[in-house]
């Protein structure tokens, strides 16, 4: 299964990071991190996939842009929906888990912002 995460902790989304993780049997084999800018393999098979994916500059360019093209836009929409129901909240994580391209769940973790 594949998990797409948009991780951030500031209300202006300036620290937004996009993660794309590939797992099998609850073990992460491979992950793209927009801060790192490439795929990293965590298993023997994942290392092989990472080497192949990292050779394709078009894929890397597209995924590096995800904090802007996917995360910020959706975070603004989803955050406003959460705020409308629960007051101002501190955005920490929003994730969508995809199995066979079917959206199964979206999760929001919100805590009171501390100053």
Image (cartoon, rainbow, N blue to C red):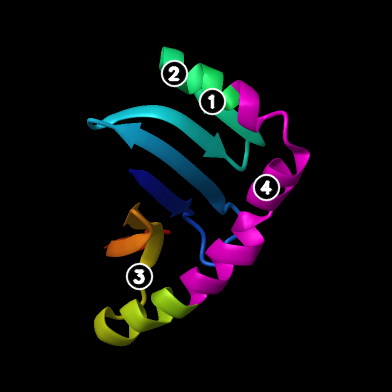
Q: Do residues under tags 1 and 3 come within 8 Å of each other at their CB atoms?
A: no
Residue 63, image x, y percentages:
63, 48
Query: From mark 2 to mark 3, how far is it between C-alphas?
Result: 39 Å
Q: Do residues under tags 2 and 4 come within 8 Å of each other at their CB atoms?
A: no
Q: Secondary structure at mark 3?
A: loop
Relative placement, left or right, of 113 versus 30 is: left
Q: Do residues under tags 1 and 2 come within 8 Å of each other at their CB atoms?
A: yes
Query: From mark 1 to mark 4, how far is it between C-alphas?
Result: 18 Å
Report crowding for label 4: few under 14, some 14 to 19, many 20 or more residues within 10 A (C-alpha): many
Q: Nearer the viewer, mark 1 or mark 4?
A: 1
User: What residue would you read off at disc 1?
Assistant: 49
Q: Earlier in the sequence, mark 3 or mark 4?
A: 4
Residue 41, image x, y percentages:
49, 22
Relative placement, left or right, of 77 versus 58 is: left
Q: Secondary structure at mark 4?
A: helix
Q: Give the residue drawn at x 44%, y 18%.
A: 45
Residue range highlighted in magenta: 51-76
Q: Do residues under tags 1 and 4 come within 8 Å of each other at their CB atoms?
A: no
């Amino acid at each position: 299964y594949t998990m797409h995460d948009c991780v951030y902790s500031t209300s202006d989304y300036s620290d937004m990071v996009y993660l794309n993780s590939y797992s099998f049997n609850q073990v992460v084999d491979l992950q793209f991190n927009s801060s790192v800018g490439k795929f990293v393999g965590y298993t023997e098979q994942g290392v092989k996939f990472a080497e192949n994916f990292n050779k394709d500059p078009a894929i890397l360019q597209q995924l590096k842009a995800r904090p802007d093209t996917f995360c910020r836009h959706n975070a603004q929409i989803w955050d406003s929906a959460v705020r409308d129901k629960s007051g101002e909240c501190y955005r920490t994580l929003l994730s969508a888990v995809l199995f066979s391209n079917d959206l199964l769940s979206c999760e929001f973790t919100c805590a009171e912002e501390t100053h």
